[in-house]
Image: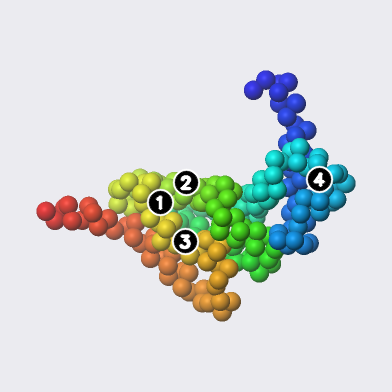
Amino acid sequence: MEVGTTVKNQPRAGNMSSIIEAGTAACRLYGPAKTNVADIARLLGKSPASVYKIFPSKAAIWDAIAGNFFETVLRFTPSADGELTSAASRLKETALGQRRLMLQARHGDSQMFHLVVLAAESSWPSFRDHLKRLHAYVGGLVSTGIATEEFVPTNVDAAASCFCASIISLWDPRLISALHSSQCELSAHELASFAVAALSQVPPGEESMAAE
């Protein structure tokens, strides 16, 4: 990209960030259902028309706000010494850590959590991107586990998809929203352990082929 183009786009990027920040504040104040573009513009000291010059629609603004929340608040960061632990341990840490972030948002940032539930219910791009990031990270750990012979050789993409699908109840905001507050944490540990252990076993299709 040319320098001139980069400089030209900087004000727009700054405006987008300001709108997302104000939109997040408005959502926390009024809730996503009651917040409108006029509320966001008022917090910015601008007109709604100026907001629409940056985002083409209200839906695009809400998706950007949700995307920023997924990226900054709901993006699990492994422990600093994660590289020294086994791939299996890091997978379990990721499964449970991502769940904790969702639960913390549900209990401590309820309005924003409601927004990501809406993102999941309507399959917004922000939610799909969030799932893609999780899938890619899991795939990287599966690949590492195969290389270190922790996990049996298999199709990495398929294994990552199966792992993510098997623990989706720990990650999907729609399912977490429906959880009873007294649900035992042990069940999450058991599910994560079960899903990780499955990667160390011969996949059913390969096992049947070996028996022939």
Foreground tag (4 vs 3): 4
Q: Which residue is mark 4?
A: 48
Residue 89 lies, with reference to residue 142, above or below; the image says below
SS at mark 2 in the image = helix
What is the quadrant of residue 6 in the picture?
A: top right
Q: CA distance from mark 2 to mark 4?
A: 37 Å
Where is residue 53? Give x, y as percent.
Answer: 76, 37
Q: Which residue is mark 3?
A: 168
Q: Nearer the viewer, residue 145 or 97?
A: 97
Where is residue 66? Give x, y as percent.
Answer: 65, 52
Which quarter shows the N terminus? top right
Q: CA distance from mark 2 to mark 1?
A: 8 Å
Which numbered marker is on residue 160? 1
Left or right for 41, reference 138: right
- Residue beneath the point at 71% across and 23% down: 5
Q: Amino acid at mark 1?
A: Ala
SS at mark 3 in the image = helix
SS at mark 1 in the image = helix
Foreground tag (3 vs 1): 3
Where is residue 157? Give x, y as percent.
Answer: 38, 46
Badge 4 or badge 3: first in the primary sequence = 4
- Crowding at dot 4, Cα within 10 Å, few <14 / some 14-19 / many 20+, comes out as some
